[in-house]
Amino acid sequence: MKLLKIQNDLGYWLNSDGGYSPVDKITKEDLMRLVELVLDKDVEFDEFNGENIKNQAHQIIYKSIFQKLHDLLERKQEFIDESKRLYLYEYEKYRKESADNSAGPGKK
Amino acid sequence: MKKIDFHIHTVPTISDSHFTFELSNLVKYVSVAKLDALAITNHDLFDVAQFRTIKNALSVPVFPGIEVNLENGHLLVISDGSNLEDFEAKCRLVSQKIIKVGDMLSVAELKSIFVDLSGYLIIPHYKKGPAITAETLKKLEGYVSAGEVDSAKKFIRTIKDAGAITPVLFSDARISDRLERIPVRQTYLDCGDLTLSAIKVCLQKGKVSLSEADGNELIQIFEDGQKLSTGLNVLLGERSSGKTFTLDRIEKAIGSESVKYIRQFDLVQKDDAIYERDFNSDVERKSSRFVEEYLSAFRAVVDDVLAVDLRANNRKVELYISTLLKSAEDADRQDAYSNTALFDEVELPISQSDVLEELIASIRQVIENVEFKSIVEKHLDTSALINLACELIELSWKKTLENNKRKLVNGLVKDIKESLKFRTSAVQLSDVDLYRTRLDERKINRFADIVRCLKDEAVISEESIQGFRVEVKRGSFEGAGEIKNASNVRTGFKDAFQKYEIPYEYLQALRAKEDLSPAELYKLFTKISYRILNKDGAEISGGERSEFRLLQEIKDAQNYDMLLIDEPESSFDNMFLKSDLNQILREISESMPVVVVTHNSTVGASAGADFLLFACKETEDGKPKYRLYSGHPTDKKLISLDGKSIGNHEITMNSLEAGQGVYDERRKGYEAIKDPK
């Protein structure tokens, strides 16, 4: 899915309705949604080359967000590996007892 | 049988506290203890002149020796004394090497000094601190004749162990001018001549015992020669006949730190409420180490989560977006400073190399493991593993270098951005690390998963102690009061409890409480409770609580060299004494000496004592005289040290059954009410 799109010399982002909104309307919540999509889904962006957006305000915003999401995409595997390992030993340790206690006949 | 003590100190050294040697006390010791041979073994020193004086003053063989600090342990080296000058010269070399506390010899140094160790009697500290390590012992293989232990209990355990070296028990006494008690720790050898070579053969063959006539069944306990069984001793006697006094004397003779002494009425239930509280706190204290260990993993998680600030993360994202939109709005206000490429530059991301480091550690473990080497090699090519490890290590170096470069650049960019910001009115973009922000959220989710597990009711430990079951359970707190109890602080937890269902919020609420230490917060997520259940699985009653405590105390006795119990019947009923106490006393007396004072026939007559003692207060010449009679339970008469005797049947009847008449009457009474069916 394409998260950032350049169309008619303007920058757009994929909103929660599946349509595209202009980048100068993006909010913090929207950005966090895009971050989540980068890490959980297969995504792509239109590349900003310095000329394909004419509006100066759109240029600034698109460039910055594109850079951020692009960096994150590059580290996606690292993120997945690191997330999986988060407190894994601890989680398994305490979860095991819950499983043991509910499986056995001696549930208290 | 020959009685020997080959570990005696006569010169204070840096390894001793100061004392003044008194020859007459050594002569007295040899005479009272009836020693057949002794060795003088001072720390890393041999005083030949003093040795000659000692030898001349005694009529029994005295061997010259030295106690050497060897590779963190102690070792006795004893010579046959045929060439004192040579032995002294060698010991002087030891003294020159050991001049301050902590100095020690290596086995190689020891061998180079004494040249041929097989010419000496070599006895390391074995089951006695500071003990010679197994590794050092291996280097001394072929030279060691016996190993020193420090209690009768360890002596018996060692002699029963087929793989162990022959144990010897010596006094290790400082013969000072203030010697209060004649030492009672010696070893008997089944040996004819007392030459060093004969003694060595005897030790190597394991011909040692704790007593002269009774092998390892009896040990001497008092300097007057009074003995005790190395198994179960029952001490009888009327009121005020000196029984407790005798137990106190035994405690003093062995050393209170080595004796587990359960005094009379120690376990009797007094006030119900106080008792229950004490009892519960006692059980909890004993289990608290387990709980701390159980929650240690969670503690690390809490410590880590405490560093996560979701609100700050949120603010950073907000600031990033607002400054981004603002700088876009103000695009026309850009100037020479804000137009520079570095003005809105963001920091380069720094990767954590934990995953890689752990992977490298795991592969190293596979390569370096010795125990399962053959299985690993069956399935994997070691050289390929080594190549893999090398490549990953090189990658880790590369990543570290890259990260260091990035940190340097980030620092530089930050400085430049700061100085550009001062010179322009344009809005500078506030940076945010979206990777960390997102990962922090994942952390909080996993933390919540773990807390959910911990709140899930489950039995986390079950320990059986002589038929009782200690059950440790985890679960969720039911109210603010329960959290307060677990916290040991006075603050209320009503506000925090409202957030108990959302672990991260709850943690923040706990953190805001000033009188709670952050290091203790991990204890307030899951309720740990204890229950002690009896044989039928029901919670135990007051009487059962006393039984449980007694059994726990006896279990604890395993860590001591001797167990003393004064009148256990004061606290328990006969069924418990017969079925549980007697059995556990029998079991524990298999491995250590036990002395029980009792009036109770269930304990006294049914416990299966190995040795019987009878304390008696007699009047001689108008003055009270306390006497101790002893013997085996099957002996017709018990004998005192000064040769007096007393009928075993009579004292047993008097002590346990209130006399023959009462016993006969009671028996008749029982016969009368017995149902013939």
Image (spheres, coloured by chain):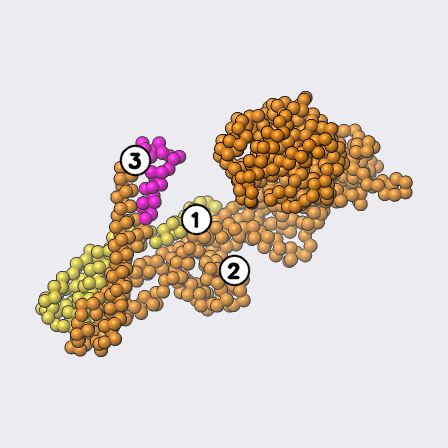
Chain colours: A yellow, B orange
Whole-percent x and y of residue B222? Answer: 73, 38
- Few, some or many residues within 10 Å of mark 2 (<14, 14–19, 20+): some
Q: Chain of mark 3?
A: B
B298 or B59, nearer to the observer: B59
Work out whether B382 lies above or below B255. above
B9 or B135, nearer to the observer: B9
Q: Chain of mark 2?
A: B
Q: Can you tell which of label 3 and label 2 is closer to the viewer?
A: 3
The quadrant in which residue B446 appears is: bottom left
Q: The disc labelled 1 sits on which kind of residue?
A: Glu
SS at mark 3 in the image? helix
Q: Which residue is mark 2?
A: B486
Residue occupying the point 69% across, 54% down: B270
* Magenta span of residues: B357-380
Q: Could you tell whether B16 is left or right of B242 in the image?
A: left
Q: Could you tell whether B490 is left or right of A6 in the image?
A: right
Whole-percent x and y of residue A78? Answer: 26, 53
Q: Could you tell whether A85 is left or right of B488 in the image?
A: left
Can you tell which mark lies on residue B382? 3
Q: Can you tell which of label 2 and label 1 is closer to the viewer?
A: 2
- Is residue B40 located in the magenta-colored stretch of the structure? no
Residue occupying the point 34% across, 41% down: B364
Work out whether A31 lies above or below B423. above
Q: Which residue is mark 1?
A: A97
Whole-percent x and y of residue B536? Answer: 58, 45
Can you tell which mark lies on residue B512? none
